[in-house]
Image (cartoon, rainbow, N blue to C red):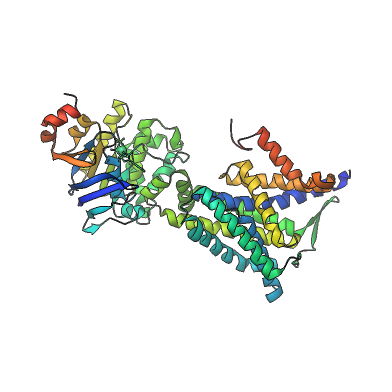
Amino acid sequence: MLELQSVHAGYDGIEVLSNVSLSVGDGDYVTLLGANNAGKSTLVNCISGLVRPTNGRIIYKGSDLVGVPPHEITSMGICQVPEGRQLFPSMTVLENLLMGGIAPNARSRRPERLEFVFELFPRLAERRKQQAGTLSGGEQQMAAIGRALIGGPTLLVLDEPSLGLSPLFVKAIFEALRGLHQGGLSILLVEQNLSVALRHAQRGYVLERGEIVLAGNNAKLRDDPHVRRAYLGL
Amino acid sequence: MDLSILPQTIAQGVLVGSTYGLIGLSMGLMYSVSGAISLAQGHMVSMSMYLVLSLYTGLQLDPYVSVAITLPVLALAGAALYWFLIRPLSGNAIMVFQASLGLMFLIENVLLMIYGGQFHQVPSIVSNRFITFGDAMIMKLPLLIGFGVTGALAGILFVTLEYTDYGRSMRAVHQNERSAALVGVNVQKVRLWVFAMSGAVIAIAGVLLVPSTPLHPAEGLKYTLVGLMPLVLAGMSNFFGILLSGVIIGLAEAIGTVYISGAIGLSLPYIIFILILIFRPHGLFKGH
Ligand SMILES: Nc1ncnc2c1ncn2[C@@H]1O[C@H](COP(=O)(O)OP(=O)(O)OP(=O)(O)O)[C@@H](O)[C@H]1O
Ligand SMILES: [Mg+2]
């Protein structure tokens, strides 16, 4: 469904991603692992259209996404949950969720998807009138995921959703993601938290200094000596 | 001190001030989605007022009728301002500041060239109509219309911002531009529309000012100032605070002119502005 072919990207002439190729198939649950500054967010933002690759192609459902503006990519079914939540802080939870379905093709289905998100995260329903900036970190993450879901994604891209959350919230969020995946949603999960990521995704890529150094299914990644040493501290 | 004209002075101040609030609002709108402010907004007001003059001399249109033409023209000018000035400078506030200074001189000199340096007056059929309230208050009808229109605009703006997708998109672009793009907002289009709206507000302020204000090419700077003051007092994107602060400035102006003679009276709005900034450096409506 999504295929990155030799993508290069950077900022002000400094290359951050070099020759990155990866793919996410229909119904896949793929994780992208990497340490701080590896270039994970840059990669995700290339997919979403916020960063323009200097070279390479990003093929989604047969067409190249390079140069397509972010709002159109969202309408095409790729919704990103950005690193650090990035909610609209002075809007209520409900308004944030409504914004998730702002794209013209998503508006008509907003009410039913809103219903769905409130069922998935009942906490959001309780706090629908609260300003998003005053939510706890875990609640904000739920709201950010909910906001992305209301766009009606076929591919959900999450950038470090477990960052800074208590284990209880991490569990709740990953359980919700598991349910969504079982319902047919394709997921690309960016994580530094390998143990969590490898418990849930089916396969993954390891990104180091802008290059994919390893790819494979969970068992392969978990047993790789380099991964064990560098990321799991074993 | 003649207190019998106090109620009328206050009313006059409130009404004039609401048009100042509108000018501030036009700047607040552009700031909220682009993070930059054009200092030429006051000159755009002048431009719209002279357009009203031309429509009057050329087509005998009453100012309140010619707004049907100046509004779309100024909306286009606002959109052009975004497209050709703000967008290429990618909202870099300092560069926009400088470029808008250039625009100020350009507009002022073009107006001078076309209309000359003398004062002009555009009458409206309602210019000399008065409405009396009780026995103390006599109000010029144009000012009353100004107040009503400003109130109506504030109402429309409130409903738009709070309850429509369009208004939520504006707030989203203001609060987090990248997230707005990620959820599917066409950020550029929102900016373009808000700048057009800002121009439309300018056109309305211009038409409201025309019947009670003589026109002169050099007045632009004054309008920029009376627009900037409420903007600073209220906080750049507190739209209702801006309208209210405009009223405060207008009140200071009316009371200063009527009750305090000489230069001090004329500069009362500026004195009050500076005093407020000294005692409430974060503006009038910010919490602690
Ligand atoms: N907007 C930007 N402008 C300039 N450089 C940037 C920008 N964003 C990221 N970088 C640089 O690109 C490199 C990769 O950053 P990126 O955010 O993609 O890494 P990451 O893997 O997501 O890191 P983290 O785990 O901390 O989120 C870093 O060296 C960073 O400093
Ligand atoms: Mg990152």
Q: Residue at x 30, y 44 (%)?
A: A42
The extreme bottom residue here reads: B59
- Residue in the image at 46% along x and 55% along y: B190
Relative to residue A46, is residue A232 depicted above or below?
above
Q: Where is A45 relative to A37, above or below?
A: below
Is A68 positioned to the left or the right of B6 in the image? left
Identify the image quadrant of the N terminus of chain B: top right
Tally of marks:
0
Q: Residue at x 61, y 66 (%)?
A: B70
Query: Residue placed at 67% from the left, 57% from the top?
Result: B220
Q: Quadrant of residue B146?
A: bottom right
Residue B232 lies in what quarter of the image?
top right
- B13 shown above or below B49: above
Left or right: B152 as drawn, with respect to B174 = right
Q: Residue furthest right?
A: B1
Horizontally, residue B263 falls left or right of residue A207, namely right
x, y percent for residue B269: 73, 45
Left or right: residue B266 compared with residue B207: right
Expressed as whole percent of the image width and height from the top left, the position of residue B93 reads: 52, 48
Q: Quadrant of ligand 1?
A: top left
Frontmost residue, A31 versus A124: A31
Most foreground residue, A181 or B287? B287
